[in-house]
Image: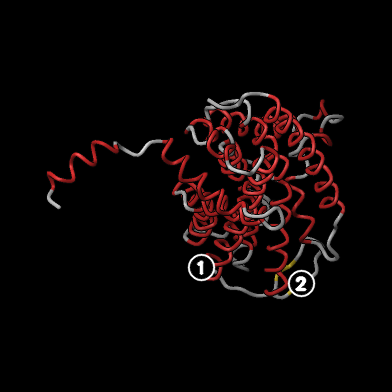
Amino acid sequence: MSTSDRAPAAVAHGPRTGDDDGRARVARWERTAGPPHGGGLRLFGSELAVLFRRWRTWALLAALAAVPVLIGLAVRFSPGRPPSGRGPAFLDQVTNNGLFVGVVAMIVSVPLFFPLTVGVVAGDTIAGEAGLGTLRYLLVAPTGRLRLLLVKYAGAAVFCAAAALTVVLSGAVTGLVLFPLGPATLLSGDTVDAGAAFGRLLLMAGYVTVSLLGLSAVGLFLSTLTTVPVGAMAATVVLAVTAQILDSLDQLAWLHPWLFSHYWLDLGDLLRSPISWASFGDNAVLQLGYTVVFFGLAWARFASKDVLP
């Protein structure tokens, strides 16, 4: 077929629009919805495929992976050893054991980089679909609003785990390349071998994942309030920063245990022997509370209001 023959067909069909994307996605969701038993997992798999096929998702993970690389390079090529007591916690241990690159990167990323990336993903869950015009097509599929909301939150939770593991693995590789590896000295003064130390790093990734679940629920709720995803993203990040500012004010000590960011930096308790699980448990209970409350608010908004553009 000649170019002139193809031109009228292209004009007739027109450019691909958000409606076309919505119809394509609803077709995939209908295929994955399947029977009542097991359909939820296939639907979840479809959501993960959409999330991790986006260039934005990989750009966010690449930015997180760069944090330990930059820390490692800065320490490796600095004129002297980092002074003890200055800079992020454990920075002075990096030159002795490369696994501490991951530890420092986790501590540095918790206050800003993790909330920033998770805020982008969580704030886009519903608002992004509404802004593109694909939400109404997704709701036509045999999914139901509650099921769609659960899948969206679960996708954001998986991204939280992916973000934490990205920093840990990037830190481990950077430390392996730039510094010696060996037994690590814990906060309690005990020494563990490199394998056990890497296991502690994985536990820290789990701690950070749990820490971000409450923020993900907040972002999901904010995402149901607007059809502009940038607004939901920005509001989620601002709330994360605000919570940390409030948590630093001694005058508001009574409020600190109720802030979702209160236990974020207690991940250092995993570097003791024996491990202190108290902060992990308190953090998990707090994040569960935020998840229940804000997922409930998101469901109330999503179920009772016309969120379609």
Name the foreground residue: 193 vs 288. 288
Q: Residue at x 56, y 27 (%)?
A: 308
Q: Residue at x 18, y 41 (%)?
A: 7
Q: In the rendered view, tell whether residue 77 sits above or below residue 58.
A: below
Q: Is residue 198 visible in this depiction of the protein?
A: yes
Question: Are the two marked residues, 2 and 1, in contact with CB atoms closer than 8 angstroms?
Answer: no
Q: Which mark is residue 64?
A: none
Judge by depth and name the residue closer to the eye, 240 or 126: 126
Percent x, y for residue 183?
69, 74
Q: Residue at x 54, y 51 (%)?
A: 64
* Kind of residue at disc 2: Thr
The answer, for residue 84, to whether it is visible in the render is no
Q: Position of residue 238 (x, y in %)?
A: 62, 30
**Would you identify the image quadrant in which residue 207 lies?**
bottom right
Which numbered circle lies on residue 178? 1
Q: SS of the residue at dot 2? A: strand
Is 156 left or right of 50, judged from the image as shown? right
Q: Which residue appears at 64% of the width and 44% of the height?
A: 143
User: Crowding at label 1, few (<14), some or many (≥20) Cα neighbours within 10 Å?
Assistant: some
* Along the line of sight, the residue nearer the viewer: 8 or 212: 8
Q: How busy is the neighbourhood of tag 2: few (under 14 within 10 Å), some, or many (20 plus)?
A: some
Q: Earlier in the sequence, mark 2 or mark 1?
A: 1
Return the mark for residue 191.
2
Estimate the spatial distance between the alpha carbons at disc 2 and disc 1, rounded to whole Å: 22 Å
Residue 91 location (% of width, % of height): 63, 56
The spot of residue 215 in percent (x, y) is 69, 39
Q: Secondary structure at mark 1?
A: helix
